[in-house]
Amino acid sequence: MHLSRWQRVFLSVCSGILLSGGWAGSYWQLMVFFAFVPLLIIEHFFCTYKNEYKAYYFFRLSFLSFLIWNALSVWWIYYATIIGAILAIVLNALFMTLVMYLYHIFKRRNSLFLSCVFFIVVWLSFEYIHLNWELSWPWLTLGNAFSENTWLIQWYEYTGVLGGSLWILVINLLIFLMIIKWYENNWTPRSLIYTFIVVLIFPTGFSLWRYFTYKECGNKAKVLVIQPNIDPYNDKFTGMSVEQQIERMKYLIKKGYDQEVEYVVCPETALPQGIWEEDLKIHPHVKEFIEMSKQLNVKFVIGASTFKYYKTKETSTARKLEGGYYDAFNTVLFIDKDNIQIYHKSLLVLGVEKMPFSEFLGFLEPLALDLGGTSGSLGVQDTPTVFVNKTKIAPAICYESIYGEYLSKFIKKGAQWLCVVTNDGWWGDTPGYKQHLSYSRLRAIEFRKYIARSANTGISAIINQKGDIINRTLWWKPMYVKNYILFNNTETFYSVAGDYLGRISLFILSVLTTYAISQSFQRYLEKRKLT
């Protein structure tokens, strides 16, 4: 297969656009099933003519594809920070390009079959690493691409999102192989066609069967979700007093309250003024919710900014204070009359709440983006906290809701339903908040748990165990939603095993890499003998 320069560029652009479809919503998400095919065809061309073209030719075209994908999918970050948007788009595109480059280097020296296996495991290994290292940014994990077509991926309760990534990669490879075989031989082996049909139809059929036959389980509790809609740029931390913000929330609570409501969920940093944790029960803003909890006989799950004092520097994030040190936290409080439980956000947003590789880059701390409240590296807690009362609740703050394996730790500790509290107002009316909402639907399927999601500016929602949104608010309007949720003790296979597909891929990748290195060394020795 020969491709001209402009044909290669065209195919590269096509891959980038098709990949971005996974984050365009609706049925556009299905474009990911063949989005890698143009890029794989380009790679096959460079492998075929490897004596004429160096590997970096493919590197450049891969980078173009991934730059387009990232830019079209997460351009909205620039509403919060232009520098952050550029870094997120360029660095993530570079990481993805390195993955494809490794595949190309491997394929130049090994069989097509082994290369296909390598392609799958190197990409899954990359996604797994990207979920767990200091520069974690798993927003574009391939398996997230079905977040609005949950009827397709009910089997995520067994695999998590990496199962979706595996499915996408295998289907792309099969389409690529069918095209190449047809072009080179003027026919496509039936075995490839049958394999493609099975790989496409079986997971879809199983998912549809699971979706229509799944019976929700658990006991009932009524939840009221509050969306105060306080502008994070102009009101939350500067223009509107905390008292005014509380009054708006109280108004919505009283408007939505009925005697069956047991839980009220308020968004991230609903209490934006830093509160010393030693003084929680006597702080006037917290006391207002304690009194409401007593009067209405409800429990509150509410976001807050809190501080904790230390006599000595007990953590790496502790800041100097006259007479000691303190940590600043992005916090969720559980308030049940006089009983207050605390959870500190532990997966932090890069460049806003956390400086990566702080032991080396700590001097850049003053450059952390200030989105209101406390900027710079925040404190975290070592193990998740499950709020325990009549039910057991897993609290997740904003960014944490896209990490399935992390949230599975709450399920292992007995969590029966999830509360997601977030702001989502930093990006304006862009795809950002829509994508963030849809990721919670994936968590509902992975754990078969109800999710109550409170977003300051929207969209707030209640999501059932099949990932369906059963109640939702409008964007940028003060609103509330309420409904019954079911809480249960179900532990899905995924909640127990976590991202096992990533770990398996890392193992296979290490075996294939060792094999490739040994083969290269053997070829080198043979050349030495000949000379």
Image: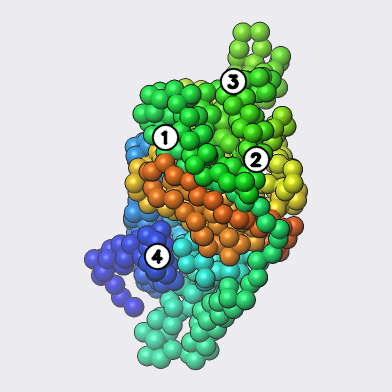
Among numbered discs 4 and 3, the one appearing first in the sequence: 4
Q: Left of 468 or right of it: where is 486?
A: right
Between tags 4 and 2, which lies in front? 2
Question: Percent from the top left, x then y, of residue 247?
Answer: 48, 29
- Sequence-first tag of 1 and 3: 1
Looking at the image, which residue is at 52% across and 88% down?
194
Q: CA distance from mark 4 to mark 3?
A: 45 Å
- The residue tagged with tag 2: helix, strand or loop? loop
Q: At label 3, which amino acid type do we have? A: Pro
Q: Quadrant of residue 31?
A: bottom left
Residue under circle 2? 298
Please indicate whether residue 373 sits to the left or right of residue 134 in the image: left
Spot occupied by residue 9 in the image (x, y as percentages of width and height): 28, 63
The quadrant in which residue 127 appears is: bottom right
Crowd rating for badge 4 (residues with CA inside 10 Å; few <14, some 14–19, many 20+): few
Mark 2 to mark 1 CA distance (whole Å):
23 Å
Marks 4 and 1 sit apart, C-alpha to C-alpha, by 29 Å
Identity of the amino acid at label 4?
Ser
* Front tag of 4 and 3: 3
Determine contact: label 4, label 2, CB under 8 Å.
Answer: no
The residue labelled by disc 1 is 230
Q: Are marks 2 and 1 in contact (CB under 8 Å)?
A: no
Q: How far across and how far down the image is residue 369, in percent?
A: 43, 30
Q: CA distance from mark 4 to mark 2?
A: 37 Å
SS assignment at label 3: helix
Q: Can the viewer see residue 18?
A: yes
**Sooner in the amino-acid sequence: mark 3 or mark 2:** 3
